Amino acid sequence: MAKQLSLLQHNLLLAARAQDWQQLRGLDRQLLALVQQLEQAGAKEQFASQLNALRQNYQHVLKLAKSELSRTEIQMKQFNQKREGLVAYRQTTEGKSL
């Protein structure tokens, strides 16, 4: 289980850095299932240091995802502003509306 936890944790970071959100979602589910197995087996204490490292890496992944979300929101806002400007320009130059 330790090896599996380590591998999933590593792949989680790689997927976040690559901005592979689909893979990240799948890895998140796998990690959740593994942590639940550890809890059910009463092995949480045995893997405490790895779970702590996982928690820290997970926080890093969340920061990366939030940063990308913010960047995307800004791009969408800029796109919509440009689109509104283009629509207004077309309406004044062509006398038409879209």
Image: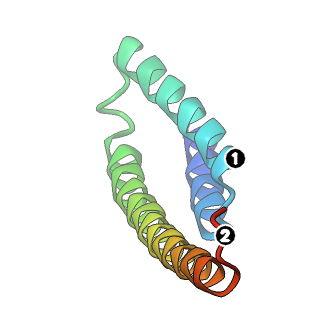
Residue at point 36% right, 20% down?
39
Q: Is residue 50 found left or right of 75 in the rendered image?
A: left
Where is residue 1 drawn, in percent x and y? Answer: 58, 32
- For numbered disc 2, what is the local secondary structure? loop
Q: Farthest top residue?
A: 40
Q: Is residue 42 found left or right of 93 in the rendered image?
A: left
Number of marks in the rendered image = 2
Amino acid of disc 1: Gln
Q: Farthest front residue?
A: 95
Work out which quarter of the rendered image holds the C terminus and state it: bottom right
Residue 35 against residue 96 in the figure, above or below? above
Q: Nearer the viewer, residue 88 or 32?
A: 88
Q: Which residue is mark 1?
A: 23
- The label nearer to you, 2 versus 1, is 2
Its colouring scheme is rainbow
Residue 83 against residue 3 in the figure, above or below? below
Q: Is residue 1 found left or right of 66 in the rendered image?
A: right
Where is residue 8 drawn, in percent x and y? Answer: 61, 46
Residue at point 66% right, 70% down?
96
Residue at point 38% right, 66% down?
63
Residue 33 against residue 13 in the figure, above or below? above
Q: Residues within 10 Å of mark 2 (few under 14, many from 20)?
A: few
Q: Earlier in the sequence, mark 2 or mark 1?
A: 1
Q: Which residue is mark 2?
A: 96
CB contact under 8 Å: marks 2 and 1: no
Q: Nearer the viewer, residue 30 or 51?
A: 30
Residue at point 61% right, 48% down?
24
Where is residue 86 drawn, in percent x and y? Answer: 61, 81
Mark linked to residue 51: none
Amino acid of disc 2: Lys
